[in-house]
Structure formats: structure tokens, C-alpha cells
């Protein structure tokens, strides 16, 4: 779990903000507080990696609307929703929209801390996969046009002979291109190559 992660706490109740900020700081987390969804959105372009802990029922933009807006502007921080008992259906809707968890007030401190640990673990995984995907895309950009065509054929599930026919090449030439692109991509097997291609967003036909 990233020790530099920041917990972005959003709640319109000042007493709740102060109490939870104290709890999170005592547990070793860096915390930033916001009095509304609008306040968070105004700072969304500069927020540090971590996770969002938001009340679901707030004046103006509520927790669910905030999630939708964050998706629209490309903020992918995991979200933990806090909810009162009467707002559980809204919190369930937030889960369907991608929230990591929701917790009912009043809750034990450990319930919140546990939900945050899960959220930060997910954020770490998302960051790792994003870095891997970018590395794969960089390798794909270094392929020749023919190597890229062979890669597309392999991802589509075609054998060398079919790829050779489609590209008007000899099977031997396709084998050479395949060996070269495997080397450039750092793939140890065909399945490894296909996995990397899918990670980079090359569609299977």
C-alpha cells in the first residue's frame, strides 16, 4: 500500500470532518478535507493519489453525482461512501457505479480504516496496471508495420499460414516477423503476447 497516499474526505458536517480527519491522521494517513462535492471538484485537477471517502447525502452534489462527475473528468481514485441507514439504497447505487465500499453510520473506526485499506490496495493495482499498459504500448510503437500486422493476426487467433495468406507473404516470412515482434515485446509465449496486446487495448476480432 502506498504510504504517500492521501485520503480525500468529503462531508458537509464540520464536526464529522474533524472527527474523521483526526481518526485517519492518528492511523497514519495523510488527509485533506472538503466541505462539499463542489469543493473537491474544484481541486480535482491537483489531487494527490489515494482514495476518496465521501458522505452520500450532501447539499448540492451528492456522493453519487460526485462519482459520475469524477468519471466524466477522468479522476479514477477509488471511492468509499458513508451513508445513513435511510440512504442505503443510494449507497448501493453508488457501489453499482464503481464505489469500492459503503459503510453505514454510525460505524466502528476499524470498519472505515479497513474499507480505506481495500480502496488503497485497489488504487495501487490500478496504478501498476496503468504503468504496465503504457510500457506495452511503448513497445508496440517500436514494431515495424509488418510486425504490427502479424501481431494483429495473432491476437485475432489466426495461425501463421492464415496470416501469411492475408498479408501475401510466405509462412516463413511470417515466422521471422513473429519471432522479431516476440523479441521486441519481451513476450515468452504466444499467450504472453496476446495478454500484452489486450492490455494495450488491441481488440480481439
Image (cartoon, rainbow, N blue to C red):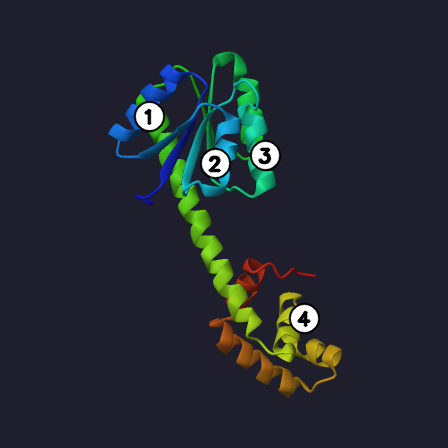
Using the image as rendered, state which of residue 5 and residue 139 is in the foreground. Answer: 5
Check the image and report above or below for 85 versus 97: above
Residue 125 in the figure: left or right of residue 133: left
Q: Residues within 10 Å of mark 4 (few under 14, many from 20)?
A: some
Sequence-wise first label, 2 or 4: 2
Q: Residues within 10 Å of mark 3 (few under 14, many from 20)?
A: some
Using the image as rendered, state which of residue 56 and residue 48 is in the foreground. Answer: 48
Occupied quadrant, residue 166: bottom right
**Label 1: which residue?**
21
Q: Are marks 1 and 3 in contact (CB under 8 Å)?
A: no
**Label 2: which residue?**
43
Q: Secondary structure at mark 2?
A: helix
Sequence-wise first label, 4 or 1: 1
Check the image and report above or below for 40 versus 189: above
Sequence-wise first label, 2 or 1: 1
x then y, percent, for residue 196: 53, 63
Sequence-wise first label, 1 or 3: 1
Q: Does residue 102 appear anywhere in the picture?
A: yes
x then y, percent, for residue 192: 50, 66
Q: Give the alpha-carbon distance from disc 3 to disc 4, as whole Å.
A: 41 Å
Occupied quadrant, residue 109: top left
Residue 135 tag number: none
Sequence-wise first label, 3 or 4: 3
Q: Are marks 3 and 2 in contact (CB under 8 Å)?
A: no
Residue 69 tag number: 3
Q: Secondary structure at mark 3?
A: helix
Amino acid at each position: 500500500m502506498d504510504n504517500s497516499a492521501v485520503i480525500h474526505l468529503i462531508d458537509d458536517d464540520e464536526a464529522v470532518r474533524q472527527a474523521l480527519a483526526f481518526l485517519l491522521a492518528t492511523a497514519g494517513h495523510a488527509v485533506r478535507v472538503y466541505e462539499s462535492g463542489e469543493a473537491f471538484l474544484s481541486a480535482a485537477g491537483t489531487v494527490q493519489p489515494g482514495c476518496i471517502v465521501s458522505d452520500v447525502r450532501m447539499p448540492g452534489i451528492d456522493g453519487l453525482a460526485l462519482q459520475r462527475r469524477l468519471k466524466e473528468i477522468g479522476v479514477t481514485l477509488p471511492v468509499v461512501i458513508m451513508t445513513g441507514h435511510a440512504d442505503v439504497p443510494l449507497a448501493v447505487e453508488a457501489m453499482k457505479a464503481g464505489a469500492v465500499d459503503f459503510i453505514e453510520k454510525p460505524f466502528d473506526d476499524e470498519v472505515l480504516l479497513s474499507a480505506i485499506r481495500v480502496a488503497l490496495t485497489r488504487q495501487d493495482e490500478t496504478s501498476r496496471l496503468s504503468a504496465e499498459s503504457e510500457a506495452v504500448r511503448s513497445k508496440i510503437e517500436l514494431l515495424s508495420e509488418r510486425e504490427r500486422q502479424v501481431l494483429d493476426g495473432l491476437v485475432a487467433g489466426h495461425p501463421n499460414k492464415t496470416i501469411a495468406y492475408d498479408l501475401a507473404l510466405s509462412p516463413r516470412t511470417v515466422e521471422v516477423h513473429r519471432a522479431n515482434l516476440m523479441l521486441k515485446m519481451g513476450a515468452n509465449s504466444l499467450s504472453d503476447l496476446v495478454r500484452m496486446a489486450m492490455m494495450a487495448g488491441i481488440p480481439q476480432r
